[in-house]
Image (cartoon, rainbow, N blue to C red):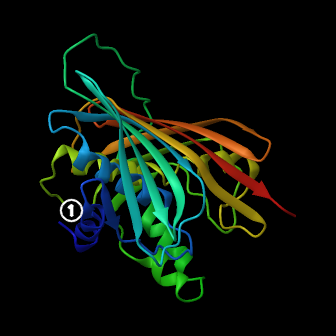
Amino acid sequence: MSDILNNLIHLLKLEKIDDLIFRGESQDLGFRQVFGGQVVAQALSAAMQVAPEDRILHSCHAYFLAPGDSQYPIIYDVETLREGRNFSALRVKAIQHKNTICHVTASFQVPEKGFEHQNTMPNVGTPEDFTDENMMLQKVAQTLPEPLNEKFAAERPFEVRTKYLNNPFNGTKLPAEQYSWFKTNGETLLDIKIQQCLLAYFSDFHCILTALHPHEKGFLQKGMKVATIDHSIWFHRPFDLNHWHLHAIESNNAFGGRGLARGQIFSQDGQLIATTQQEGLIRFNE
């Protein structure tokens, strides 16, 4: 396991303050605001410590209410909404400076057998056919001032290969889609709970940025304001992030200063393991 992946896993293992209260440290990715994927992943980690052991997370829905501060820890307050025979619904409030910055609702289910069907994985090529996103970010880092250049050039917990590379400071016109192969940086033995938290963390990286592709904008371009409004994930099948997975994203709409993106995550052998959907603010001021 790489050190950077180990650090992320440690970040997702929260400190227990009380039976329903947990505390998580914040990660500084070079911006003042906390990365939304971190908040969702930590909220799920908190919910998993409260949900019955025989139930597995199958969906979550997050609403971001206010920006988080990357320099301070976050408190997670868990509430059980319903405890049924097969399903449990929990709500997690992410709190910072006494303000709720995010609400996450998570549903857990006792595993069972049932009908099966799924979409077919798009034929877009293998990871070897795509460009190393981390190498692109390292090149961008050479043009940035400190300390932002250090953050962009840093090793990352995921290896990522993307079809479309959009410079965050100087966007180009691209189709309203993105295909990203990803896996953990270094192999490790992880249980399903940590795997799901890691997937939730990663899933926030490319979604809403895909909505900028047709408009020739990068998310850090002068005049741009980009922020996640809500984020949803449905977990369908077991998976192992030690191996390559494809996140196929399309943005079907942008209107009123908001963009919408929907993604499907496939294992390399074509199993649909999760679906994502995100709406975000994409505002440009000349």
Left or right relative to 109: residue 102:
right
Give the quadrant of residue 16. Answer: bottom left
Q: Give the residue at mark 1.
A: 186
Residue 149 appears anywhere in the view: yes
Report helix, strand or loop for mark 1. Answer: loop
Which residue appears farthest toward the bottom when viewing the image? 146
Residue at x-position 40% and y-position 64%: 75
Residue at x-position 49% and y-position 57%: 36
Query: Disc 1 marks which amino acid?
Result: Gly
**Foreground residue, 9 or 43?**
43
Rendered view: 277 above or below 227:
above
**Foreground residue, 119 or 27?**
27
Q: Position of residue 161 (x, y in %)?
A: 41, 54
Left or right relative to 210: residue 283:
right
Rendered view: 131 above or below 264:
below
Q: Residues within 10 Å of mark 1 (few under 14, many from 20)?
A: some
Q: Quadrant of the N terminus?
A: bottom left
Residue at x-position 24% and y-position 22%: 86
Q: Position of residue 57 (x, y in %)?
A: 29, 36
Left or right relative to 228: residue 238:
left
Give the quadrant of residue 165. Answer: bottom right
Q: How many marks?
A: 1
**Foreground residue, 65 or 142?**
65
Residue at x-position 26% and y-position 60%: 18
Q: Quadrant of the C terminus?
A: bottom right
Which residue appears farthest toward the front when viewing the image? 18
Q: Position of residue 89 (x, y in %)?
A: 35, 33
Which residue appears farthest toward the left when viewing the image? 189
Rendered view: 127 above or below 42:
above
Residue 157 appears anywhere in the view: no
Q: Position of residue 272 (x, y in %)?
A: 34, 29
